[in-house]
Amino acid sequence: MDTDLKIQSDFKKNFISSLIFLREQVVLNTLLIIPAIFLIESFEKLIIFILILLASNIFSMYLLGRKRNRELDEIRAIINNIRKNKYQTEEEIILDQNLSALQKAIKKMFIKTKNDIDYLQRLQKMRSQFLANVSHELRTPIFAIQGFIETLMNGAINDKKVNLHFLKKANHHTINLSNLLNDLIDISMIESGEMRMNYGYFNINELLNNITSEQKNLADEKHIDLVFRPEDNQLQLFGDKDKIKQVMVNLLQNAIKYTEKGSVEISVEEKDRSATIIVKDTGIGIPEKYLDRIFERFYRVDKARSKSVGGTGLGLAIVKHIVEAHGSKVFVKSAVNVGSEFSFQLKK
Ligand code: ADP
């Protein structure tokens, strides 16, 4: 009984589906019937011809409708499977041979959608990780400051041996906090595309001279020689002067932070159409396996060391973004306990 009903409803469905070809059928029939009227003289034979024509039409419309329904069902099933994430690869998408062009288009759409979803999921994961890192980084100095203030309030304020020491420590953490916030603002400006670049020609040696004088105290405090001997005082390079200053300050401060004795040397190597700016130190160096990772946000080779010298873990990520915005790349060479060399090129 059920099968009978299904056959009936399939027949109806197939027939209705074929109705989109009705116009073509009517045109074809008219084209056949008009000459038949003139050619077939006997009225009975004409009626028989028309009846056979109509019967064959109904049959062919049914067949067409059935084929169309099968194809539509196949396409519908594929769309549903894509919607329900049932396919792992595009190879699983298979349509009837005569729909190969459509199959190709669906595969392309599937690959694009899959890539977009993968990208969004990666982005979402990175965002959550970033947020977790930021909260963690903020918590450390805030807890430390809170601890020192509480200890002072609980009586240490009157203890001349420790009160100044605690205040200095709390101050050290507020400086870390402010460095972190500044770096976070920079990173978010870069990533949201809000960091405006102001390109132009500037005198590189003048800029490097100024930066060296500004950072001299930091190097003196650690008894490290900060060396810069410019060759061509008139050399003009193309870039955003303020952002290049930020890059250089980050690289120099890192070089000083991670060097215990010896020197930090800045040099400019001029080429035909560009110049390479190099910051070289005789510091602790970076093991080769970490060289790729140090440009990641919050990545530090030695967490405790970075924090104790006021590092945020964001400096090199900012450096990389800025240098890449100049169409260039930061290179690093390093050997443990020998030193590190960071360099990048700017156009002339
Ligand atoms: P941080 O604020 O921790 O210095 P950065 O992003 O500037 O963060 O640097 C990432 C890590 O790379 C540092 O934590 C440090 O381990 C390593 N690093 C950067 N510059 C140097 C350098 N000149 N010498 C040795 N290690 C360095």
Image: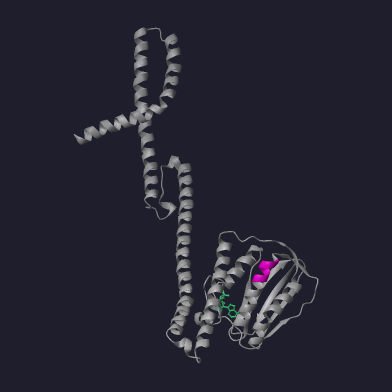
Q: Quadrant of residue 226?
A: bottom right
Q: In this view, does 190 lie above or below 204?
A: above
Determine whether 163 is above or below 267 in the image: below
Furthest-left residue in view? Answer: 1
Q: Relative to the observer, which residue lies in front, 125 or 168?
A: 168
Q: Quadrant of the N terminus?
A: top left
Tell me if 177 is positioned left or right of 238 in this view. Answer: left
User: Is any atom of residue 348 visible in this view?
Assistant: no
Q: Among all residues in the image, which is located at the extreme bottom?
A: 161
What is the number of callouts on the image? 0
Residue located 46% across and 42% down the image: 102
Quarter, ligand 1? bottom right
Where is residue 123? Give x, y as percent: 48, 61
**Front residue of this view, candidates 132 and 77:** 132
Q: Residue furthest front?
A: 158
Taking the image as shown, residue 158 lies to the left or right of residue 276, namely left
Task: Check the picture and name the quadrant holding the C terminus.
Answer: bottom right
SS majority, magenta? helix
Give the left or right position of residue 299, taking residue 217 as reference.
left
Q: How is the image coloured?
A: one colour
Q: Give residue 114's position: percent from left, percent from top.
A: 45, 54
Q: Which of 281 and 201 is in front in this view?
A: 201
Residue plotted at (42% across, 20% down): 26
Residue 244 belongs to the span the image colors magenta: yes
Q: Residue at x 61, y 70 (%)?
A: 319
Which portion, as a residue range, is magenta?
Answer: 241-246
Magenta span contains residue 152 = no
**Depth check, front residue: 207 or 105:** 207
Image coordinates of residue 46 in percent, x first then y, are 37, 11
Note whether residue 11 is visible.
yes
